[in-house]
Image (spheres, rainbow, N blue to C red):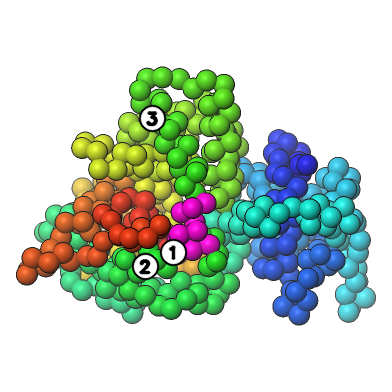
């Protein structure tokens, strides 16, 4: 059973996903949720018919509407277009009942609620299925929110301390130091600075410090999906993405079964990351994977906050291979973490212009938490840029090398080994530092 968004070129999601999103919207944005824990089952949500931009709707405090919910389900290219109309409501009458909400002022507003059929369908699903769809829906709220315009779009702003305000770096390199020395200072700073995770504007867990403990504190998209559980959820998709990549590396093509697997795998990756995309075709997937495994900075393959995740995941098998480049997912959170810290270090060292420093390390727009962050230096825009994707990945590999090799004056390793999701410890990987920088950049 599917929910179809005709105003988004018939983009579809499963009915289970839609009901999970409905539940998340009540949990996150309904003014009555705290008082009525089961309000999502029987409560009404304003329909909110509107052709205004997503940014305008959020500024007008219209988060808790079916219109905003629907826009967050579709790919970014359609998020400024109205998604809910009479046709949408009529097409999904099995799941949604039309109603009205009355206010103390005496006014009324068109609303919708879940039908008995929708509730029965949800109850027929296993808890494992329900959890999967709930995680997908939470990811839609937590992820980078992309729209066609440059207007800020923040569904759930958390607001934590500004970089450099309370946690000064352990050391500042000399102004003339090379780029690598500033990367070393960045790595040391993240090791030294305390980190507090937040969820629903409240601290999640205890404050920690150090790359090791920061990784253990990682979760996505909610605290219950910890580092280990997230790894377990993504591992089957990572395995398939890497097998698809290895096949292309050998010069072979995918048969019909693998072509179908490619589309299914990548669609699920976008659901996990909360970044739905249009044109998830075999050809587009193949172009992205080929560009990724070849570290092609000049590629014209698709690139944004969703496709960068595929590029990163499908190159994990290159970890440790000489002259190969496992990629990082260079999204707004990772970019904010790296650039804000480098910017502060460079400015404190007396650098006033980037010049040839950190070439192609570019910004990616994103709002929420402490983003967008203010920079002293003029960093280039890196959104949808393969040059930035590759440059950011080379920097990420430098971080990995520093974490795995740098020693103290007495010869001891400066940094603890990377905690493995299944237990034990091992060398740091790009995927490991990805999670730390992702959390740090919020």
Residue 203's x, y, as percent? 50, 77
Residue 343's x, y, as percent? 29, 62
Q: Which mark is residue 218?
A: 1
Residue ID at (74%, 59%): 22
Q: Which residue occupies the foreground of this view, 99 or 96?
A: 96
Tag 1 secondary structure: loop
Residue ID at (26%, 48%): 397
- Which quarter of the picture shows residue 406? bottom left
Vertical placement of residue 299 versus 383, above or below = above
Image quadrant in which the C terminus is located: bottom left
Residue 235's x, y, as percent? 47, 47
Residue ID at (79%, 53%): 124
Tag 2 secondary structure: helix
The rendered magenta stretch, by its main secondary structure, is classed as helix
- Which quarter of the picture shows residue 345? bottom left
The reply to whether residue 137 is visible in this rendering is: no
Q: What stretch is highlighted in magenta?
A: 225-233
Q: Residue 246 carries which label?
A: 3
Q: Which residue occupies the foreground of this view, 240 or 382?
A: 240
Residue 434's x, y, as percent? 37, 54
Q: Which residue occupies the foreground of this view, 149 or 153?
A: 153
Asked if residue 41 lies left or right of residue 190, the reply is: right
Residue ID at (69%, 39%): 11
Query: Alpha-carbon neighbours of circle 3 within 10 Å: few (<14), some, or many (≥20)?
Result: some
Query: Alpha-carbon neighbours of circle 2 within 10 Å: few (<14), some, or many (≥20)?
Result: many
Kindly report which numbered mark, 2 or 3, lies closer to the viewer in this rendering. 3
Q: Which of marks 1 and 3 is nearer the N terminus?
A: 1
Marks 2/3: CA–CA distance: 31 Å
């Amino acid at each position: 059973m599917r929910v179809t968004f005709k105003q988004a070129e018939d983009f579809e999601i499963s009915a289970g996903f839609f009901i999970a999103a409905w539940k998340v919207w009540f949990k996150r944005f309904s003014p009555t949720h705290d008082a009525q824990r089961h309000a999502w089952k029987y409560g009404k949500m304003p329909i909110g018919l509107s052709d205004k931009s997503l940014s305008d709707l959020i500024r007008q405090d219209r988060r808790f509407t079916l219109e905003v919910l629907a826009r967050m389900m579709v790919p970014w290219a359609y998020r400024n277009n109205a998604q809910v109309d009479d046709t949408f409501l009529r097409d999904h009458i099995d799941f949604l009942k039309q109603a009205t909400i009355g206010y103390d002022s005496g006014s009324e507003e068109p609303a919708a609620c879940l039908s008995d059929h929708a509730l029965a369908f949800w109850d027929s699903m296993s808890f494992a299925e329900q959890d999967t769809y709930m995680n997908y829906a939470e990811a839609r709220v937590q992820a980078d929110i992309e729209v066609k315009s440059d207007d800020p779009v923040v569904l759930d702003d958390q607001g934590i301390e500004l970089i450099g305000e309370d946690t000064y770096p352990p050391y500042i390199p000399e102004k003339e130091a090379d780029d690598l020395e500033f990367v070393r200072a960045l790595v040391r700073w993240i090791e030294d600075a305390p980190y507090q995770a937040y969820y629903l504007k409240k601290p999640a867990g205890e404050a920690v410090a150090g790359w090791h403990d920061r990784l253990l504190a990682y979760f996505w998209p909610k605290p219950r999906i910890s580092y280990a559980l997230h790894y377990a959820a993504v591992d089957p998709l990572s395995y398939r993405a890497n097998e698809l990549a290895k096949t292309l590396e050998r010069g072979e093509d995918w048969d019909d079964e693998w072509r179908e697997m490619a589309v299914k795998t990548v669609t699920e990756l976008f659901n996990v990351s909360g970044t739905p995309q249009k044109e998830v075709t075999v050809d587009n997937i193949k172009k992205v994977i080929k560009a990724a495994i070849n570290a092609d900075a000049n590629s014209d393959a698709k690139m944004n906050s969703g496709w960068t995740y595929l590029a990163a995941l499908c190159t994990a098998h290159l970890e440790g291979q000489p002259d190969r480049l496992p990629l990082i997912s260079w999204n707004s959170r990772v970019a904010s973490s790296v650039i804000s810290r480098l910017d502060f270090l460079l400015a404190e060292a007396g650098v006033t212009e980037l010049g040839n420093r950190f070439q192609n390390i570019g910004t990616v727009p994103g709002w929420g938490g402490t983003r967008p962050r203010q920079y002293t230096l003029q960093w280039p825009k890196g959104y949808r840029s393969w040059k930035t994707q590759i440059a950011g990945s080379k920097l990420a590999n430098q971080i990995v090398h520093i974490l795995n090799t740098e020693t103290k004056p007495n010869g001891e390793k400066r940094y603890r080994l990377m905690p493995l999701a299944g237990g034990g410890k091992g060398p740091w990987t790009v995927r490991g530092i990805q999670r730390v920088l992702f959390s740090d950049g919020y």
